[in-house]
């Protein structure tokens, strides 16, 4: 099929714009990787203009990942918070969305309005802090799991997907004697993998990248997530002694440690995302079309 001049111009323009956007997105992270692998002497000679490392060194990574480094403890905290938080958040989101997707639920519209209201108006930082403190959750191992365990926006996405599942499937199962829990577990959830992957990824990114809540609710560094460690390394422009125990070892230049820390923290998300991208795109499309 031969394209018209206007269509050709449109296609070429799309390729040019998308190429520029890709460069803008990829180039900064490529620079971070290059600097983290370049010895500081070469970095200084080139005045920081490193697009391709000519000499590779892992000194920064060795220093960050040295035995006794608090990076390991903070990574463990982040993995625990992320795994537990995503599991709890998905459970709460799935059960709430399944109930609200049933049009026979009494007071359904009022309950949905209640959830939508929380999306528009929040209690605020100080009331939330007072609530967390009153519940005795400050500086506990599970405060960062509970504080972000539900999102009304994600619940509405999942509810919209559940509403698209034919009622006949659930009615047939109910006639055969299946309980609501069995219908949800054996019929609805297997058909909902795209939206579960979508919402799960949204929760995963939020939990993994969170550092602000850790600043508010965590005071001990042994409970700090890795993102709070990364923020401290970058914001202080020096290596905080509370975070890394490197007795008897002179720390490498800060710029390299900062870049290496960024790579270490971002790497898991870069590995996980390609495996769920297909479900993520499909789920987001369905959630945006359904009412």
Image (cartoon, grey):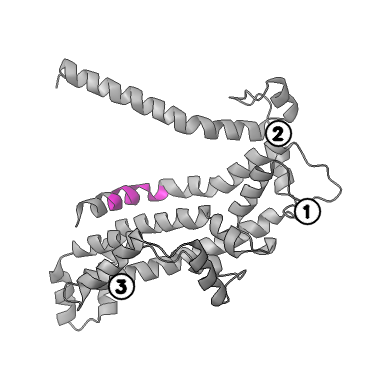
Q: Is residue 129 above or below residue 199?
A: below
Q: Residue at x 38, y 26 (%)?
A: 19
Q: Which residues are magenta?
A: 275-284
The crowding category of the residue bearing disc 3, from other C-alpha atoms within 10 Å (few below 14, some 14 to 19, many at least 20), is few
Q: Looking at the rendered structure, which numbered label has been put on residue 185?
A: 3
Q: Residue at x 75, y 26 (%)?
A: 41
Disc 1 and disc 3: Cα gap in Å? 47 Å
- Residue 14 pos. (x, y %): 29, 26
Q: Is residue 80 left or right of residue 40?
A: left
Magenta: main secondary structure: helix
Q: Residue at x 26, y 68 (%)?
A: 112
Q: Earlier in the sequence, mark 1 or mark 3?
A: 3
Instruction: Say whether residue 180 is magenta.
Output: no
Instruction: Residue lying at the far top in this picture: please name it.
Output: 5
Q: Is residue 264 visible?
A: yes
- Residue 283 pos. (x, y %): 29, 53
The crowding category of the residue bearing disc 1, from other C-alpha atoms within 10 Å (few below 14, some 14 to 19, many at least 20), is some
Instruction: Residue lying at the far right in this picture: please name it.
Output: 248
Q: Are marks 2 and 1 in contact (CB under 8 Å)?
A: no
Q: Are marks 1 and 3 in contact (CB under 8 Å)?
A: no
Query: Quadrant of the rendered structure where residue 89 is?
Result: bottom left
Q: Earlier in the sequence, mark 2 or mark 1?
A: 2
Quarter of the image for the N terminus: give it.
top left
Look at mark 1 in the image and give the residue it sits on: 245
Residue at disc 1, secondary structure: loop
- Number of on-image labels: 3
Q: Earlier in the sequence, mark 2 or mark 3?
A: 2
Look at mark 2 in the image and give the residue it sits on: 57
């Amino acid at each position: 099929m031969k394209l018209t001049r206007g269509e050709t111009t449109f296609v070429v323009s799309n390729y040019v714009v998308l190429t520029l956007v890709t460069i803008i997105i990829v180039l900064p992270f490529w620079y971070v990787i290059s600097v983290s692998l370049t010895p500081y002497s070469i970095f200084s000679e080139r005045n920081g203009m490193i697009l391709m490392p000519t000499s590779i060194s892992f000194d920064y990574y060795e220093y960050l990942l040295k035995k006794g480094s608090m990076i390991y403890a903070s990574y463990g905290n982040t993995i625990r918070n992320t795994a537990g938080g995503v599991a709890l958040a998905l459970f709460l989101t799935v059960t709430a969305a399944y109930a609200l997707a049933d049009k026979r639920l009494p007071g359904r519209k009022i309950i949905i309005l209640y959830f939508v209201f929380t999306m528009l108006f929040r209690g605020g930082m100080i009331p939330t802090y007072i609530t967390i403190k009153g519940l005795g959750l400050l500086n506990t191992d599970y405060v960062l799991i509970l504080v972000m365990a539900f999102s009304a926006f994600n619940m509405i996405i999942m509810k919209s997907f559940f509403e698209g599942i034919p009622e006949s499937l659930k009615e047939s199962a109910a006639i055969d004697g299946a309980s609501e829990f069995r219908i949800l577990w054996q019929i609805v959830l297997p058909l909902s993998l795209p939206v579960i992957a979508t919402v799960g990824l949204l929760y995963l990114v939020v939990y993994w990248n969170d550092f602000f809540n850790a600043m508010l609710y965590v005071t001990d560094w042994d409970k700090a997530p890795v993102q709070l460690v990364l923020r401290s390394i970058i914001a202080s422009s020096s290596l905080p002694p509370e975070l890394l125990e490197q007795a008897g070892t002179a720390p490498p230049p800060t710029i390299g440690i900062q870049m290496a820390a960024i790579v270490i923290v971002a790497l898991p998300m870069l590995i996980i995302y390609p495996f769920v991208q297909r479900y993520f795109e499909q789920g987001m499309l369905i959630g945006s079309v359904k009412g």
